[in-house]
Amino acid sequence: MDSVPFTHCPTNKKNCVSTIDLSSYHRIAPLPISGGLEETKARIHMTLNQFERVEIKEEQTHYVHGVFTSKWLKFKDDLELYIDENTNLLHFKSGSRLGYYDFKVNRKRVEQFKSLFHKG
């Protein structure tokens, strides 16, 4: 795998999931992808557009960083996506900026993203 542009989840918090983490709590499987880079990025955008209160904050050739804002308390959660063309995998890191535990919101968000991405 090329250098993934995000770090591991904090080991002392349970408000993050990532495809590069090894601990069972934080680990989530990457998403197999097919098609080229531009097609994958277009599907990422199409998938993110199906969510409410998300804004793309940064985009590079193989990387997209979105920020989700909760409806009532305006908490911010970061979703980072990395397209690994060598392995045809889409890597994720989704984590809350504040708090210790997120009631698995980030895990559910990534699973919902995967489901919507496949339907696209």
Image (cartoon, rainbow, N blue to C red):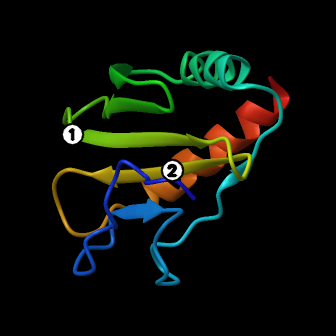
The residue depicted at 41 percent of the width and 41 percent of the height is 80
Label 2 with label 1: CB-CB less than 8 Å: no
Q: CA distance from mark 2 to mark 1?
A: 20 Å
Residue at image location 69% in from the left, 43% down from the top: 114
Q: In front here: 4 or 21?
A: 4
Give above or below for 4 relative to 61.
below
Q: Please, what secondary structure does the residue beneath circle 1 have?
A: loop
Q: x, y (%) of residue 119?
A: 83, 29
| Residue 118 spot, x, y in % from top left | 81, 35
Q: Left or right? Give the position of 105 relative to 40.
A: left
The reply, left or right, for residue 91 in relation to residue 103 is: right
Which of the two residues, 92 or 104, is positioned nearer the viewer here? Answer: 92
Residue corresponding to mark 1? 75
Res 47 seen here: yes
User: Where does residue 66 sit, x and y in percent of width and height?
Assistant: 38, 29
Q: Is residue 103 visible?
A: no
Say which quadrant the C terminus sits in. top right
Mark 2 residue element: strand
Image quarter hosting the N terminus:
bottom right
Frontmost residue, 92 versus 16? 92
The residue under label 2 is which amino acid type? Phe
| Eye-nearest disc, 2 or 1 | 2
Horizontally, residue 17 falls left or right of residue 49, namely: left
Disc 2 marks which residue? 92
Residue at 69 percent of width and 48 percent of height: 86
For residue 105, above or below residue 66:
below
Mark 1 belongs to which amino acid? Phe
Label located before the other in sequence (2 or 1): 1
Quadrant in the picture for residue 35? top right
- Where residue 107 is drawn, which disc sits there? none
Asked which quadrant contains residue 26, the reply is bottom left
